Image (tube, grey):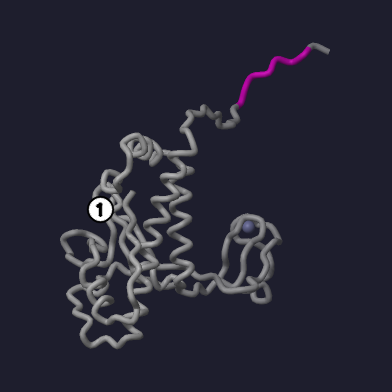
Amino acid sequence: MKTFKKEIDMKSREEMEQFLRNHFRYFTANRWNGMSSYANNMKIYNLGLPSETEDKLYDMLEVEDVTWRISELISDFAMNHDYEWQAGWNGRSSGYLVLHTGGRKKLEYKSRCTKCGQLNYKNVAESGCKCGRCGNETRVNLTSPIYQPYTNWKSVDQDEDFEDWDMDELKERVQVVMDFDQLCDDIIAEAVYMANECDIEEETYYVEQTRKVLSPRVPA
Ligand SMILES: [Zn+2]
């Protein structure tokens, strides 16, 4: 099984520069705008897995539980890096995981309806606690601000030769890219674990709906 994470000697400037310069890269957004960042080729056939595992993984990608578990790992990565570093899929069949820069912006909401979740820019003292959407008197002030993560699609270290970076800058960047490679390994390990330990079953489910029906009166 292929792994992406390499241990880099953080005392060696040479080794760190080479690691960053030679790391696999892919486009951050569209191919035509030419901007690229650190990435890994995560296509299933590229992972050196036994063919039964490969086949099972192709089927598993259609299972919501599986894609949800993988996206959890990706959001944890972003959270652990304060959203300054994020990872996202790109490529025609989303076969590449790409390292992105980003951040979080503070939203100006002051209150929220506890009944329907509607957010409001005014606090309760200004406008009362009646919700404008559901009409209930259930609006309360937020106790902490709400942040929304955003992703930049800019290139990262494209054509950078790192020669004028100091050691601390280099170490910091190498650490982020190593963490990103570790994330890729964690995703593969999680997917392989699910492929080996779980089976895919088909389940029929019914959605509850209401309709009007004619009901004959029972004679008194
Ligand atoms: Zn409401």
The part of the image, by quadrant, that contains residue 142 is bottom right
**Image-based side of 129 in relation to 172, left or right:** right
The residue under the point 46% across, 42% down is 194
Magenta part of the chain: 212-218
Residue 134 versus residue 216: which sits nearer the camera?
Answer: 134
The part of the image, by quadrant, that contains residue 89 is bottom left
Residue 37 versus residue 165: which sits nearer the camera?
Answer: 165
Q: How many marks?
A: 1
Which secondary structure class fits the magenta region best? loop
In the rendering, at what x and y percent does residue 46 appear?
Answer: 26, 48
**In what quadrant does ligand 1 lie?**
bottom right
The part of the image, by quadrant, that contains residue 113 is bottom right
Specify the quadrant that holds the C terminus: top right
* Label 1: few (<14), some (14–19) or many (≥20) C-alpha neighbours in 10 Å: some
**Image-based side of 163 in relation to 55, left or right:** left
Q: Residue furthest toward the right? A: 220
Name the residue carrying label 1. Answer: 91
Compared to 213, does 181 lie above or below?
below
The residue under the point 44% across, 51% down is 70
Q: What is the secondary structure assignment of the residue under circle 1?
A: loop
In the rendering, at what x and y percent does residue 49 appear?
Answer: 32, 43
The residue under the point 48% across, 62% down is 76
The residue under the point 66% across, 56% down is 115
Q: Is residue 196 magenta?
A: no
